Amino acid sequence: MGGWFLAIVLPLLVVDQALKIWIKLSFAIGQQRDLIPGLIELQFIENEGMAFGWALPGMAGKLLLTSFRLVAAVGLGFYLRRLLKDGAHLGLLTCVSFIWAGAIGNIIDSAVYGVLFSRSSWGLVAEFLGEGGGYAPVLMGNVVDMFHFTTRWPAWWPIDSMRSYEVFPPIWNLADAAISISVITLLFAQRRFFADVGSAQKEASPSSEQTT
């Protein structure tokens, strides 16, 4: 388990957090910078909730969401440990690891960013451990998002309501991408992935038949 964590989960966590900290300390809210012109840009926003800016309302919703993330992350850790023990398919192990890393990455934002950073706002870049202290208590911080697809549906697109609108408007982060891509992969490859898990468990269990 430790070796798998160091090889798969930890690198994604490090990159996710390094990017978020750089954005938090370099961009004001709403600030934009082209990454691939015409396709994707960096645009800093913070959200109080789930992936792609979705949220539950109010302080109670925030606490409920963060608590759910913590429980889910612990459960995923135990599940990954079981899969490793059972010799699961490499693709399944990778997907679950990416989902786990993404969940932990966004938990870190919610858990400690409010304490570690001053508030970001329009025209104002946050500071690390600023003189005024953090902007929120433990578990009440906001998740940092920064990737924004700028591609738009073409003018000739047959659906009138979609013409010239952004193909994918939400702003997201690396943790969101890791979770989403892994879930989609699991949906399409579940038969192959979980068939291997079933075979491994069957081979490991003692036969129920007695020979005479």
Image (cartoon, rainbow, N blue to C red):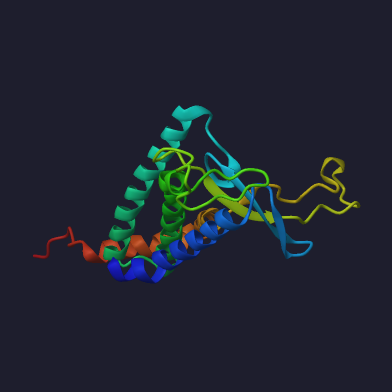
Q: Is residue 125 above or below residue 14?
A: above
Identify the residue shown where x is 16% and y is 60%.
209
Could you tell me if residue 181 is visible in this image?
A: no
Q: As drawn, is 174 to the left or to the right of 7?
A: right
Could you tell whether 210 is left or right of 191 in the image? left
How far across and down, in percent of the image, does residue 37 sit? 77, 64
Quadrant location of the N terminus? bottom left
**Total numbered badges shown on the rendered structure:** 0
Write down the quadrant of residue 70 in the picture. Answer: top left
Q: Position of residue 17 (x, y in %)?
A: 48, 59
Is residue 62 in view?
yes
Classify residue 196 by image quadrant. Answer: bottom left
* Residue at x 54% of width, y 61% of height: 19
In-front residue for pair 85/169: 169
Residue 102: % across, % down: 47, 55
Which residue appears at 77% of the width and 49% of the height?
166
